[in-house]
Image (cartoon, rainbow, N blue to C red):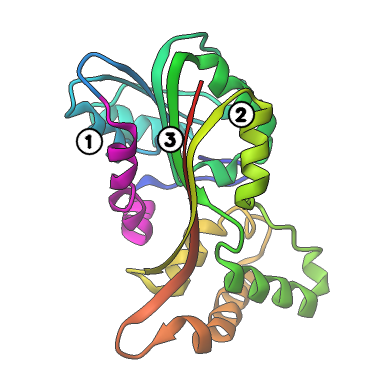
Amino acid sequence: MSTNGHKWNPMGYDDHAHYVYKLGEPLIALLSPTESENILDLGCGHGELTLRLMEFECNVTGIDSSAEMVQAANENGVSAVVMKAQELTFNNEFDGIISNAAIHWMTDIDKVLEGCFRSLKPGGRFVGEFGGEGNVGRIVNATAKYFENHPELGEFSVPWYFPSVEDFADDLEDAGFYIEYMELIDRPTPLPTGIKGWIITFFHGLMSGFTEEQKESFINEVSEMLKPELYNKDTGWHADYVRLRFKALK
């Protein structure tokens, strides 16, 4: 999960973004794992969804580019290894691949999908959900505006891959997949620690070169810009998530 210089803190992720794992449950139904199948969890994080898969008595391997997340997954009883998604080393080994909230960090998407296709057995299925076109659009716009107002910080570059249905379908088909299902889903998502917790968690890499004063300014000013759009006094903060969910076959 750690890409583009982003570093993950497993405990912090639990505090600020535990909803990611809970909202990944529909993917398990889409995958429909069965006993003794070999399943790859692509971008497994600290293994919460992987543990759910293991309840189906299938053989699950997790991979993640974050050593910290893999260590946490191992400590949770998950068989996981540090591996970049664009450098998969498997060949015809898996009956299924599942990926939740990770593909949008994988900007070298062609190599990722080629590796996934190669990793699957013939007839294998690939299911996933990640940020699609328009995901966190208000957050991205507020961040871009902040950088425009603070040119000393350099130019803002969106660190994610948020494709349209059409573009991702093309990417999958170019890799050899047959698409069985794909949908773009608007999913405004409550934030347990507010927008500041979200910024700290998901813009950690973006802020890695900031001074402490610059971090504080960024978090506070972006939060204020977003408050009229993403805050409700009765329900609190939410993020303007748009998810792309899919199932493809080899």
Check disc 3: other Cα within 10 Å, few if <14, some if 14-19, many if 20+.
many
Residue at image x 43%, y 25%? Answer: 125
Q: CA distance from mark 2 to mark 1?
A: 24 Å
On screen, 89 above or below 239? Answer: above
On screen, 242 above or below 194? Answer: above
| Left or right: 233 in relation to 83 | left
On screen, 184 above or below 44? Answer: below
Q: CA distance from mark 2 to mark 3?
A: 14 Å
Q: Position of residue 21 (x, y in %)?
A: 32, 48
Element type at mark 1: helix
Closer to the chain start, of discs 2 and 3, is 2
* Camera-nearest residue between 112 and 195: 112
Q: Position of residue 211 (x, y in %)?
A: 65, 65
| Left or right: 225 in relation to 121 | right
Q: Is residue 191 visible?
A: yes
Check disc 1: other Cα within 10 Å, few if <14, some if 14-19, many if 20+.
few
Quadrant of res 168: top right
Residue at image x 58%, y 44%? Answer: 105
Are the residues flagged by discs 1 and 3 in contact, CB closer than 8 Å? no
Give the residue number, with chain letter if any, for mark 1.
52
Closer to the chain start, of discs 2 and 1, is 1
Q: Which residues are magenta?
A: 11-33
Give the residue number, with chain letter if any, for mark 3.
127
Q: Amino acid at mark 1?
A: Arg
| Left or right: 106 in relation to 51 | right
Residue at image x 28%, y 31%? Answer: 32
Quadrant of res 80: top left
Q: Amino acid at mark 2?
A: Val
Residue 112, numbered label: 2
